[in-house]
Image: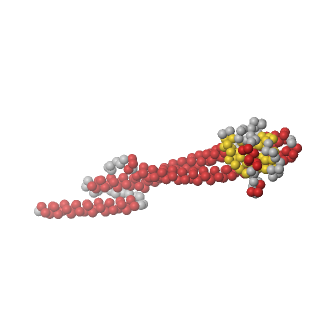
Amino acid sequence: MAESTGLFNNLRFKITLYILIGAIVFSGVIIAVTSSFLGDTLQKSLEEQGRIIAGSIAELAAEKLIEEDVVGLKKILEKYRYYLSNEYILIVDADYGVVSDTYNGQLPVELAPGPQSNAVYANYDFSSGEAYSVTPNNVQGEEVYDITYPIKDGLLGFVRVGLRKSFVDEQINRTLLYIGAVIAIGTLIIILVALAVITVQVTRPVIKLTEAANEISMGNFNTPIEVKAKNELQVLAVAIDRMKESLKTSLTRLKTKSTIGRF
């Protein structure tokens, strides 16, 4: 019988370990690339959604601002406030005063009128060719993408829409979790298939050849060497079989010479 080897010297264990390490590295690269790509894509998608919402509100709010219809402005905000990604919506007049908002007048400090908040409108660059601007913001501990959209080129005021960054993060995490699960299942299947192939094509033939070599070393030259693997192990089996026959022939000759020498 072949001598047993330790776990870390076991061929199947080594190959399984290499496959697992390769899968982990590959998964890490895939997840990193996917995370970066999804982050950019979802952020742009979220910004586009915010632009559409802000543009729609700006179009509807223009007439209400001229008429000073606060109730009408409130109804417009109620229509859009419950989008999953929306943190807040503000309608600001030409003097940078908030005339309607989704906080029912209880504006957070970060959005309350003041030098910092007013600068968002005062520094709006109409010459950039962009219909809106996007700036990172933090409101009550929530990271948001703040979209500022002018109403009639800023002559009547602005619409500000705050979109939750966590919405993008949740989408990324959900997608990465799905990808990770697929990779994990795929890796498990690959390992099981690889182990089955290794067992049939490598491990069993190696064990048979080892046992045959041990029998030959103990002088049992009638040991059959049967390896059906169609690879290098088949070549090795043929070589061992030739060696066995050569040793058998050599020993027979030595015995013959020894017998003749006695007489």
Q: Coloured how?
A: secondary structure
Would you identify the image quadrant in which residue 229 lies? bottom left
Q: Position of residue 224 (x, y in %)?
A: 33, 56
Task: Report whether residue 195 is seen.
Answer: no
Q: Where is residue 130 in the image (x, y as percent from the top left)?
A: 75, 55
Q: Residue at x 29, y 61 (%)?
A: 243
* Direction from residue 69 to residue 145 in the image, left or right: left
Q: Position of residue 118 (x, y in %)?
A: 75, 45
- Nearer to me, 233 or 74: 74
> How many circles with numbers are drawn on the protein?
0
Task: Report whether residue 255 is seen.
Answer: yes
Q: Residue at x 66, y 39 (%)?
A: 141
Q: Residue at x 38, y 59 (%)?
A: 233
Residue located farthest toward the front when viewing the structure as drawn:
115
Q: In the picture, which quadrant includes the C terminus?
A: bottom left
- Nearer to me, 135 or 112: 112
Q: Position of residue 151 (x, y in %)?
A: 81, 49
- Nearer to me, 22 or 231: 22
Would you identify the image quadrant in which residue 232 lies? bottom left
Q: Which residue is drawn at 66% across and 46% down?
A: 168
Residue located farthest toward the right when viewing the structure as drawn:
67
* Direction from residue 106 to residue 216 in the image, left or right: left
Residue 238, above or below 203:
below
- Nearer to me, 178 or 94: 94
